[in-house]
Amino acid sequence: MRINNKEVRQPKEIVTGCYYLGYVNKAFDRIVRRIETWLMAKVPEDVGLFDERIIRERLAQAIVATSRDSYGAYCAHRLTQGLELIPPDDQVLKIGGLVIDSRDGSVSLSPRRLVRSIAHFAYSWLLFLGSIMLGVLPQNGQNRRPATVLLGLGLKAILYQDSDVRFVRFCREGPILPLAKATRLLVQTTEGSGNISNPDIIYSRNPISDLVRDSHLGARGRCKLLLSHMLIPFRVLMSLIRFPVLGLIVNDIAYIPSIQTLDHAELLEAVLITNSSFSSQPLWMRGSVKRRFRVHEIHYSQNTLGFQYVKDPIIVGHPAFRHVSVDEHWVWTSGYKVHLVELGHRGAIHVVGPIMWYLPEPPLDRTDNEIQIVVFDVTPIYDHIATRMGIVSYYCCNENVLRFIDDIVGVCQELEPMLGVRIRILMKHKRSFTNGFHDQRYIDRIQVLEKTQARFDLVNYDENLFSLLESCDLSISIPYTSTAYISSHLMKPAIYFDPSQQLLPTHEPTPYIQFVSGRAELLKAMLRIIAPDNENRHTSSIA
């Protein structure tokens, strides 16, 4: 509230759900649209690096990636101070190392942010300089085979029991054609490098600079690349003098001579990123008219749709999604393809089913004389970390996820004597536990359940989900993890269970997925799936 143009405090509202996140995204997107208008007037027409439109779009994306989380954290801080959630439109925001005037969308970099950006550019420029120079050594610069590069994939997605065999099989036999057809594949990982099981698949921290070092460019081609690379710092300096905001994307520029040389020599078949990189596609990935290789985004999950609440049905997704720029998408379902089209993506969108970095395998062994369900959670993070990430009032907080687990266990306890059969609960975390990041209280509760409940068992986080789901009678997922779509793909029943009774269903409807709100409705839904012949008798006794 503002009185006499001064902001005054409001009584602090108790946050019980995630009602605020949509408003934060909506308010921030208004600012971003003003920034986009400002960039149209300010970006020089003759920067000389790329087309002006491409630079504007990339700058807008970089500004969102740099400032969105800080903006959300600032909004959360305002709530704790008793202020209105959304800052006034006439405010100058200092977030993420940027200074943004929310009135007209003008942006400037703080000195510290500019220095960091230049330092990042210097590191990348020196890295490529070393690769160019090392390529003249006899043991380097000899490979004439083109390569496909896969960026942003952690080693945890690749290795299973210290082996990459199932990942290699997915690449070579799976539905992602650029991986299946790759002459050789360079995979970016931060944890290691080298080959593991297949000589045509190389793991590297810096696959593109390694490709420059190892590829056969010829003496003339390598000298020409060296000259172009040496000129880049001067071009960056001139660009920064003319328009300092370009400092946000100067690291992109360090790659450009090397990428253009590899592309011209037809040594780069394709570049693949995952949806983890949705907020950053550098300049050299844009402008498909001037390059031969294609850029693909592989969506290994579909949980990007925003939550919608019964009490306040506003739904606004992350502003960065409309800035994604790739040539082709690889997605799970036709509904998600429609979602991308609605966001404005006009490239090819391939619907290929669940993408898990491994292929289906036979069902796991199970006991016949019991009902087996599998539960998929989202391990809650600490509240202060969620706030720092710009998540205002986190739905998957400790309270909600604990209720999700406890209600499922409680309903199974009620159903067992009604049905006269043991119900076994298999619990699978979305990913491994990270100390100091994930909420220890939740982990402690799961460990207690595992020790005290005979029906409750934990499954390794890297277990093959196709095998796991095929061996179960029902899956129950917290909204809106992608696991329900895997069940649907396998034609197995799945439930999205909202224990808080706050959400409206926003998942893609399929015959195999139900949305259930509250414990009483969960019991009825499980009866319909597990014991359809006895449903009327049991539900009448419950009522």
Image (tube, rainbow, N blue to C red):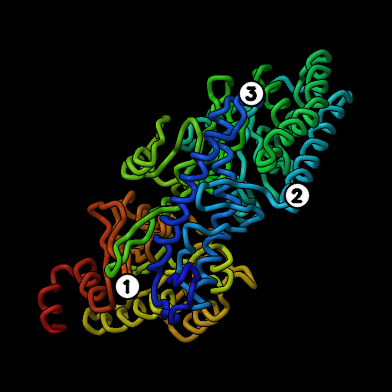
Q: How many numbered discs?
A: 3
Q: Residue 338 has which mark?
A: none
Do residues under tags 3 and 2 come within 8 Å of each other at their CB atoms? Answer: no
Please state which of residues 438 and 235 is positioned toward the viewer in this rendering.
235
Please state which of residues 171 and 368 is positioned toward the viewer in this rendering.
171
Q: Residue 46 has which mark?
A: 3
Secondary structure type for disc 1:
strand
Whichever of labels 3 and 2 marks the residue nearer the N terminus, that label is 3
Q: Nearer the viewer, mark 3 or mark 2?
A: 3
Amino acid at pointer 2:
Arg
Whichever of labels 1 and 2 marks the residue nearer the N terminus, that label is 2
User: What residue did someone put label 2 on?
Assistant: 116
CA gap between label 3 and label 1 equals: 70 Å
Q: Check the image and report above or below for 228 versus 193.
A: above
Please state which of residues 175 and 23 is positioned toward the viewer in this rendering.
23
Percent from the top left, x then y, of residue 470?
Answer: 36, 56
Secondary structure type for disc 2:
helix
> Is 58 situated left or right of 191 in this image?
left
> Is 414 situated left or right of 200 in this image?
left
* Location of residue 139 (image quadrant): top right
Whichever of labels 3 and 1 marks the residue nearer the N terminus, that label is 3
Percent from the top left, x then y, of residue 222?
Answer: 81, 19
Q: Check the image and report above or below for 8 versus 165.
A: below
Q: Residue at x 79, y 35 (%)?
A: 125
User: What residue did someone put label 1 on?
Assistant: 370
Percent from the top left, x then y, of residue 188?
Answer: 66, 42
Evaluate whether residue 543 shows in this view. yes
Percent from the top left, x then y, of residue 316?
Answer: 38, 55
